[in-house]
Amino acid sequence: MSSVAPPRKDSVSPPASGVPGPRSLRNIAIVAHVDHGKTTLVDHMLRQAGTFRVNEVVAERVMDSNDLEKERGITILAKNTSVVWKGVKINVVDTPGHADFGGEVERTLMMADGALLLVDAAEGPLPQTRFVLSKCLERGFPVIVVINKIDRQDARPDDVLNEIFDLFCDLGASDAQAAFPVIYAIGKLGLAKINMEDEAKDLTPLFETILESVPPPQSDSEAPLQMIVCNTTHDEYVGKLAVGRIARGRIRINDDVVILGEGGTQKRASVKQLFTFEGLRRAPTTVVEAGDAVAIAGIDEIAIGDTVADRQAPEALPRIVVEEPTIKMRIGVNTSPFAGRSKASKFLTSRHVKDRLEKEAMKNLAIRVEPTETPDTFVVLGRGELQLAILVETMRREGYEMQLGNPEVVTKLVDGVMSEPLERVVVDVPQEYVGVVTERLGSRRGRMEKMAATPGGRSRLEYVIPSRGLIGFRGEFLTASRGTGLLNTIFEGWAPWGGTMIKRANGAIVCDRSGTATPYALDHLQARGLFFYAPGVDVYEGMIFGEHNRPNDTDVNVVREKKLSNVRNHGKDDNVALAVPRTLTIETAMEWIDADELVEVTPDAVRVRKRVLQCNLRDHRMDAIEDAQGV
């Protein structure tokens, strides 16, 4: 339950009392490419500002509250927190760094007046760095550049600083923005300094730079109320919470307000409870002034992008606009013979799936849900495969069963021409793998634009490639580079449709009957390809058991057992030695399947199958490939 955070006696600086005025408030967003250290830096900002007791046990990456975030080590959802430094409250928004979650960045930047841009001291600016910086510059933010991880052996802070300045110029930064302050930091140790030769003791230089460089909110607390809703969340005690920033005016408990929705709709409402952000907690309060971040309880029918306004003078703020989705995927009810067999399954019907997807689309502006010709299947549009895989994994853990179609790109008409999305790809690999990576990207219609050597015997390649050419490429890339390569992508634009592209070179090993897979059968089938499952797993007709080593599909009997007889065998049975199966996750299964295949997802299993289960009713894979190639 939310509670007011008491002042800490051991704080570095005591928190300000009362409602912060405009001069004692700063709003800042932390933006960066994935894995450049945002959340770790926020950890130390909270610790050094006295948010936690001296003896309090705090987990690493404390802002990663989601289980998936902790498991994967990435930020998926933008989150609000605050610290108090020398009597000034600093509202901090921790944003995701992965390109697939760019929609989170776009909507949460509306809560800030400035930005901390983190850049890895070795890797330098990467595609998502360009994206988040462009959004900050468009909003006119002053940007503080933090060159992080300067303790890396391959750190090159001077070169990275030059690359950052070039990026500012490329993005059309103003003279004031291009004169950005620079902080050198070791985020995991909580150290920062102004110059490389200085001695770093703590994050004091960072806090001081924030107070000097980020202006206080320019807002009028006496004007009629205007607040933009940037996020919605749920609290088990008070229900739905609308999180946003007050653009002008002030808001009090029990105020009568009007909600200005999409299309000019108006709904009357009353504010039941108010919360501000103090550290990691939502602290109850009675009044919040303009410029501060706030969470409002008591308004159920409110959506991201709506404006909370004064009833006497309602005036809407511009709605939040995020970039269009580029990937779509069909999600439907599980129709396999094993549907409903899992004890953890709770939601199996189309109504359950539809309600859950629509709920996700309401709180995530980068997700769209559209109906299909059948009532039990829906098209979900998003920014990338990872975003859709995270959604499916979340639903699976909640007890949903579903089946997924293969990811496809979203097409649209541009000047009357059917067009597809393009991605800018930055590849960082050891020099000995440049040839094989170039070959793989070239076969997927990638066009190289830059190539440069980097320290440590590595090379950085920059490509522009159709988005559908990247579907299923990450696994292939890691295999080709022996796990040593780094692949980063960002949406580049639209280009005319480039024609048919074969996604997978090899066919599938398909079960031709139901039963339990036996070691005896698999031992005789090993030469045909790579298996996805171990012996002892239950299978059904049409379930894909592995990847064939030839282009065509093959139907096999994986349940065959050795026949026993009364005749004594003088020889000894050979021990069955099977290769370790390649375990499929939701992401790898989505990448692997082709147009005539589906991924079956249950709370305790991920399986791949053919759309048509019966062997005698299925089209041959080679026929489909020849049709696609125009043979």
Image (tube, rainbow, N blue to C red):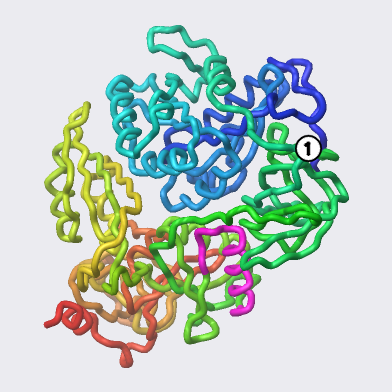
Residue at which label 1 appears: 283
Residue 533 position within the rendered picture, expressed as x and y whole percent measured from the top left? 38, 65
Mark 1 is on which residue type? Ala
Q: Main secondary structure of the magenta part?
A: helix
x and y percentages locating residue 412 in the rendered image: 35, 71
- Structural crowding at the residue carrying mark 1, measured as other residues with C-alpha within 10 Å and reported as few (<14), some (14–19) or many (≥20): some
**Residue depicted at x 29% and y 25%:** 162
Q: Secondary structure at mark 1?
A: strand
408 vs 232, nearest the viewer: 232
Q: Magenta span covers which residues?
A: 349-368
Vertical side of 141 occupied by 297: above or below: below
User: Does 354 lie within the magenta span?
Assistant: yes
Residue 361 shown in magenta: yes
Is 138 rendered above or below residue 496? above
Residue 141 appears in the picture as rendered: yes
- Report whether 209 appears left or right of 222: left
Residue beneath the point at 27% across and 44% down: 426
